[in-house]
Amino acid sequence: MSASLPQETELIEKHEEILGRRAELLMQMESLREQLKIQRRQQVEESEAACHRNSTLLQDLQKIEVRLRGRQLPRPNLLALETRYWLSVEEYIPAWEHFLLGKGPHPTHALGQPPRRAKQKPSTAKGQGLPPRPKPRTARSEQ
């Protein structure tokens, strides 16, 4: 029986070590479970806030839509001008994109045109933009 005593002691130590590791793992699992609960709670709160925000935005958009329906449409010639404007903008996007990204020259330089100079401001004198007034004439005496 004395030979089995050291084996029993060794088995008891291994059993206690296993129980210790089990307790550690249980504590880690409990900690992880609590963290997951907190994350789920936060996600639910964020989701509810997003739903509220989305419903508010939807209501605002519906109000704007109702207001726009009551307005008259712009005149056809104004619509045509706007359409032509956006077509020209879309046409020049590639040239401006290269310039704005710092990959190419200014678009007007590429067309062979020298850069435009800023217009000079007219003098700030009285009567801006009008020709000078004539000088008053003196009356001639009849002789």
Image: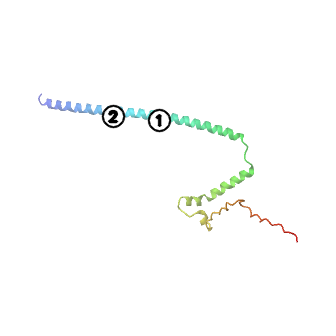
**Left or right, residue 22 beside residue 3:** right
Quadrant location of residue 12?
top left
Which type of secondary structure does the marked residue at label 2 adopt?
A: helix
Amino acid type, label 1 = Gln
Q: Residue sitting at 67 percent across and 55 percent down?
A: 85
Colour mapping used in the image? rainbow
Across and down, in percent, residue 36 comes to: 41, 34
Asked if the residues shown at circle 2 and circle 1 are in contact, with their CB atoms under 8 angstroms apart, the answer is: no
Q: Look at 74% across and 52% down and name the residue there.
A: 77
Q: Quadrant of the N terminus?
A: top left
The quadrant the C terminus occupies is bottom right
First in sequence: mark 2 vs mark 1: 2
Disc marking residue 83: none
Q: Is residue 135 above or below residue 39?
A: below
Tell me: 74 left or right of 38. right
Front in this rendered view, residue 15 or 36: 36
Label 2 – label 1 distance at C-alpha: 22 Å
Query: Which image quarter: residue 140?
Result: bottom right
The residue lying at 14 percent from left, 31 percent from top is 6
In this view, which residue lies farthest toward the left? 2
Q: How many marks?
A: 2
- Residue at image point 55% right, 34% down: 52
Judging by the rendered image, the residue that carries numbered circle 2 is 28
Percent x, y for residue 137? 80, 66
**Left or right, residue 46 beside residue 9:** right
> Residue 43's mark?
1
**Residue lying farthest to the right in this orientation:** 143
